[in-house]
Amino acid sequence: MERNGNAESRTCVVGAGPAGLAMTRALMRHGLDFDCFERHDDVGGIWDQSNPGSPMYDSAHFISSRGLSGFHGHPMPEEMPDYPNHSQVLAYLRDFAATYGLRERITTSTEVERAQADPHDGWTVTLKGGKTRRYDNLICANGTTWSPSRPDLEGEFSGELIHSSQYRSSDRFSGRRVLVVGAGNSGVDIACDAARAADAAWISMRRGYHFIPKHMFGRPVDVLAETGPQPPMSIAQRIMPMLIRLQIGRQERYGLPKPDHKLFESHPIVNDQILHHLTHGDIAVKPDVERLDGDEVLFVDGSRESVDVVVLATGFRSAIPYVGRELFDWKGERPQLYMHLFSPHRDDLYGIGFVEADGGIYALFDEMADMIACAIRTSDTHSASHARLEKLRREQSPDVSGGVRHVSSDRHASYLHLPAYRKAAGKLRKRLGWGRFDPSSLAINASPTRPKPGVIIGSGRGPTSSTEPH
């Protein structure tokens, strides 16, 4: 695709959650011209519980630990607890934005309603209210947990049926009989709330999962994994279950089904509170739901329970509603991008944040944002590097699974192993002449000068903590 020949192109960034903030900092550091639009009245995305559609509930905490969860150059404060709550994460994100002067470059309370791809080059962006603007590049950073995924359950239910995104407080469960459907990290959190507040509580699990305690040997489990020996994944998949078993025993004794996959082949459940509640009889495990029947729920094992509230903790679909679906390749409900960043169809379209990983996601966003900024800079110069990337982005992405055979699900269609991704990113940067990524250059006291062409901010072994927001 021919570029428009401007000395420097203008870029539109949609969203000022964690990925959008990382992207804004990268574009500023590279001296690129851009606008960032955020539909809410401040930065922070899902972590602002007051934002319409935020899935944040009162008891939500980060499931990766403070020490491994921050952006490069801006660690989470040491006075925070090991696992910050949602208000503390939001405060951290807003402090990050203030420290790096990002707020001044972000237009809040402004929704992008539509981004129309021009036939040959660039984008016409329509803002809510009808104003349009012209851009050379579009970066989608609108987040992944705004569009609830709801299963079609057979039958009719006479009680209250909600998605987890509608849940806020355990007050909703007081004096009621509660069923949580789904055993992801959010589902298990909500099930623990129900165990404490409800008259009776159950959690429905269609398969067995690996449950990991948040602390092992007195340390956050991700810190232990990061700072300890780094064996090959095949060995780690044997050693870690042994260590977990030493600490909590076999999880089947809690009434949990045996996992049908190896550790790390599905996102593990980082929660030990549920084990406490199971051993105290505060909650019970049920298999998959077969159908709803008035005020009862029938399960696939033939058992049934009278229930007042059903919470569907069944995840989210990735949605990019302002861009034509045909401009992305999709696997289920997950956009498939080269290196999880570059559209295979247009060299002026990017996505960031549509990914899950087995490590600190904010630092990864920094590294991804830097690659997008490099790509935009090389596109401005009509360089050989740009031509090579344009060819590569239409090819199949390198394998960044780290040898893990993830379970077949929509969620794992965009899952990556951090060391494998960083290795692939390093190879790509070298091939395109972008240089190494230097995390230290992102510290607030680092040199603010614009990087020279071909020199980027980038990589090395990073944190390996969990990535789910809560």
Image: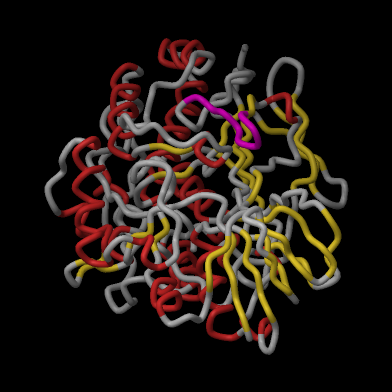
x, y (%) of residue 293?
82, 63
Identify the residue at horizontal 72%, vertical 52% (top origin): 150
x, y (%) of residue 66?
33, 66
145, 350: nearer the viewer? 145
The span picked out in magenta is 331-338
Identify the residue at horizontal 81%, vertical 40% (top origin): 132
Residue most extreme to the bottom: 175
Relative placement, left or right, of 370 versus 427 is right
Let me know if residue 333 is in the magenta part.
yes
Relative placement, left or right, of 465 versus 347 is left
Let me know if residue 453 is in the magenta part.
no
The quadrant of the image that shows the N terminus is top right
458, 262: nearer the viewer? 262
Query: What colour scheme has been applied to the protein in the rendered image?
Result: secondary structure
Task: Give the mark count.
Answer: 0
Identify the residue at horizontal 33%, vertical 40% (top origin): 418
x, y (%) of residue 27?
48, 42
Position of 393 relative to 452 (above/below):
above
Would residue 107 be seen by someone viewing this image from the given angle?
A: no
